[in-house]
Image: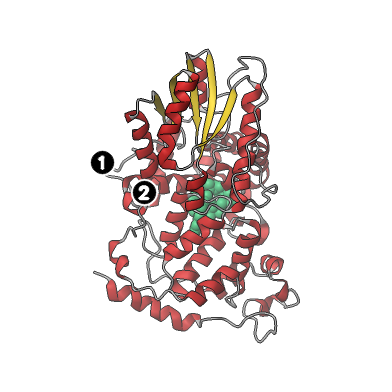
Amino acid sequence: MTAAVWFRNDLRSLDHRALSAACANHREVRGVYLLCPEQLNEHIIAPIRRHYLRRALDDLGRQLGEIGIVFDVIDAGHFRDAADHLSEYCREHKIDTVYAHNEWLLDEIRRDKDCIANGIPLTLLDDSLLSPLTIAKGDGGPYKVFTPFSRRCRDHLAANFPTCLRRPQRRAKAVQNAPCPSFGPERDSDAWPASQDAALEQLRDFCAERAEDYRAARDFPGLDNTSRLSAALSLGILSPRQCLARLQQECGEAIWDSNSGAGTWLNELLWREFYRHVAYHFPKVVRGRAFQAYTERIPWPNDQALFKAWQDGRTGYPIVDAAMRQLNTTGWMHNRLRMIAASFLCKDLHIDWRWGERYFLENLIDADFCSNNGGWQWAASTGTDAAPYFRIFNPTTQGQRFDPEGEFIKRYIPELKNLAAKALHQPRELSNYPAPIVDHQKVRHITLALFKDVRD
Ligand SMILES: Cc1cc2nc3c(=O)[nH]c(=O)nc-3n(C[C@H](O)[C@H](O)[C@H](O)COP(=O)(O)OP(=O)(O)OC[C@H]3O[C@@H](n4cnc5c(N)ncnc54)[C@H](O)[C@@H]3O)c2cc1C
């Protein structure tokens, strides 16, 4: 009998538990991916991410082909029809076991239950996280605050350092898997590594050359010091275990020191885990609700014109505008800028964080529900471990602090390229660049009132 490996957001052949288990237990193995274009259209996936996904699928087909595994990409229409399509696939290919990795969001959990209810012989393995999702506080409850969560994860990892699995050996003559057809409008994503080899090389470079300075340099968008691996991690082209293993290989014991560059980077990987932990244990955030219930009562004014100016990078605040233009032109935004742009939308323009959350999901190459939702709820002060509502980023001083010479701003706002660093963060009366659309000092008082008025 034959086993199938159902690939989801784990598009790699190295360090893949489901693939390794299938190859260890079965003579015949096929790989399958259920493409759900209708679902992708409903959720408005960014054209750049669509292209990136297709490239990643092609690379996975190549990797599997090299070890003699046929890889089928099936058009499953809508996500809710996945179980029917998979049943049919199992019948057609006489599959007796389907191996896959657990996914933790509500719809995914429901889909897997449907598959099992439909008689699909699904074996689910944990693979996508460094620490178990069930990691809990002393009282057995889930964590709501990052620092103790990360401490607990570090202890767990120190005691159970994960090992990476090798790629299964070639089991048959190499096969040529067909390329994945285009499934909607695309935008070129070639600047991002979609192949496993390229992502691994990028990881190696980062850990060897930049991890040490990460703590000092990560907040300065002009320095380009972060790993830029979020897109690869979001599709599972790399596993977090591979990241940790390579980090340890290059930086040794420094990974356990959260004040070192390597330790700080590990912390970022743990933020990723923390937001998955939150989405699993508090599924109301997956249903679009704020974690802090009282903030649901905020009457966000939601001015459409202000929202449009923010989207277009024409707010008159250079760091915000450069951030939004980076997103619009490259499909990615530096983390410090995501925090600044998100704070500005909610706390200066008074627009519901869900509008920004959606815009990011629709435009990011690394769009990831949990990290995006967590980041937005943090910035809007509506989340678990959120910034207190009275801490409001000043977009001018943030620019002065994190892009003092305007190196980054000038890259994305050529209108400002002739200004001296001192004038750059508060440009005045330029014919080709807008004046600030709101007065930060005035609107921050409105924000404080919006929160204060609805607090319990
Ligand atoms: C409002 C907002 C929205 C965000 N939306 C997303 C998103 O859709 N997808 C996404 O992957 N990240 C998101 N993030 C987190 C973070 O901004 C990106 O992961 C990071 O900028 C990616 O760049 P990098 O790969 O160079 O990160 P590095 O600094 O090199 O970090 C390494 C990895 O750790 C993870 N990571 C880093 N910071 C965070 C964080 N704050 N939260 C969760 N994981 C983190 C990412 O997987 C990242 O690739 C968001 C943050 C905010 C504030």
Quote the CA–CA distance across marks 1 and 2: 15 Å
Q: Categorize mark 1 by other alpha carbons within 10 Å: few (<14), some (14-19), many (20+).
A: few
Which labelled disc corresponds to residue 151? none
Residue under the point 33% across and 71% down: 298
205 left or right of 11? right
Identity, as a three-letter code, of the amino acid under mark 1:
Gly
Q: Earlier in the sequence, mark 1 or mark 2?
A: 1
Question: Residue 153 sits in which quadrant?
Answer: top left
Q: Position of residue 440 (x, y in %)?
A: 49, 80
**Is 277 displayed left or right of 187 in the figure?**
left
**x and y, in percent, of residue 383 in the image:** 37, 59
The spot of residue 364 in percent (x, y) is 56, 54
- Residue 330 in view (yes/no): yes
Q: Nearer the viewer, residue 437 or 210?
A: 437
- In terms of secondary structure, where does tag 2 sit? helix
Residue holding disc 1: 140
